Image: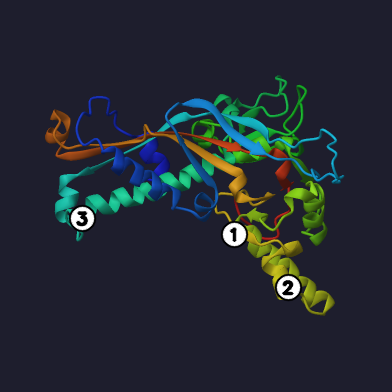
Amino acid sequence: MATNKQIIKDAITTESVSHGLLSPYQAKKFLQQTFEATPFQQAIRHVTRTEKSGEIDKIGIGHRLLRPKVENAFDGVTASPKFGVVKYSCEATRLDWDITNETLRQNIEGENMDTVVTNLMTKQVGVDSEDLLLNGDEKASEAEAFSSTSTYAAGDCVTEAGGLYRFLKAHAAGTWNEAEVEKIGDATDKVFLGQNDGIIKTLNDSHIIDVSGAKEMELEMFYNAVAAMPNRFNDGTLRWMMSPTRQQQWELFLLNKVIDAGGVVPESLYKSPVGIPSMGVPMMPNDTIILSNPKNFLQVNTYTMKIKKDETSVEAIRKDKRFYVVHFDFDAIIEEIEATSIIKNLPLILQGTN
């Protein structure tokens, strides 16, 4: 059975498709379904624009604005909102699939199979969107096989032994050194991940808690992540965003502490380190935890999302097939970088993959 990657890779060209274009209402409904595909997609903000690039306005009012009142006097100090913008630039992406009419005739779902497959693809668009929103790195598309005679800058991507890696620091010409890189996927992922920069790459300019070399998780790393952020953002809206595997490993760490040292761990600590609730984000790397208000993250789309279905073209008739393609564009932006912390290079207690 073909994987989703193979479906995208082997998609049939549909430039000639002119039938089955969804109405604007249907397209917006499809977009809504993709937003509901994962908990993270539901938690963040979604902004729709007609332009492929532009700016998102933001507004703040500062703090410590109150001044003493003196009767019949005014010190000339007034408060005013602070305006800013966050730039966005949507990149186009697509998903193609096709179904033979023989499949529709012979399966237990019958004609409803059309809807079943479309709903599955809708969910996959949401899952893949979350993946790109978090892990996208435009430099991945430039990745070539590692060469010991080449030099690399921090952030450059290469392929090596079937993996896709990003350099954490500059690399002078020489042999491969795994301590200098982080794995961000398989070599075949470079086209997918290279479509746009994601949140994790952007957060390299944030408050970074690097726990490289640690042998196990510690409660201290959560406290350090909170302390790295200005207090005004610690207002009860923060959430720890981590992979489900990382959530389970934190639970295992605490259970081992109970077994090894005795005593009791407060129940709330399992789900809410430092009193801040955690949420499972399936597409988060296992070695990374983000602290922020999920509403601080925005996915920008335009109204140009299209789903095309063709069953009347010459190719469709001759092959007795139905062809489908989804087109849309997106960008991931962070409204306030200062309101985020990220814990990186966490040790793995259990075997697993990103």
Give the labeled residue for mark 1. Answer: 244
What residue type is disc 3 on? Asn
Q: Is residue 211 visible?
A: no
- Residue type at tag 1: Pro
| Sequence order check, earlier mark of 2 and 3 | 3
Residue furthest to the front in view is 72
Vertical relation: 205 (above or below) 108: above
Instruction: Give the secondary structure at mark 1.
Output: helix
Closer mark to the observer between disc 2 and disc 3: 3
In this image, 119 relative to 133: left or right?
Answer: left
The one nearer the camera, 203 or 28, is 28
Residue behind mark 3: 112
Judged left or right of residue 11, residue 301 is right
Residue at x 82%, y 80% (from the top left corner): 263
Cα gap from disc 1 to disc 3, whole angstroms: 33 Å
Q: Amino acid at mark 2?
A: Leu
Specify which label sits upstream in the sequence, 1 or 2. Answer: 1
- x then y, percent, for residue 61: 70, 40
The answer to whether the residues at label 2 and label 3 have Cβ atoms under 8 Å apart is: no
**Residue 255's mark?**
2
Q: What kind of element bears circle 3? A: helix
* Residue 78 in view: yes
Q: Residue, x 60% and y 27% (percent of image)? A: 139
In percent of width and height, residue 38 lies at 48, 53
Most foreground residue, 264 or 257: 264
Q: Residue at x 62, y 38 (%)?
A: 334
Could you say where residue 28 lies in the image, as x and y percent from the top left?
A: 35, 42
Q: SS of the residue at dot 2? A: helix
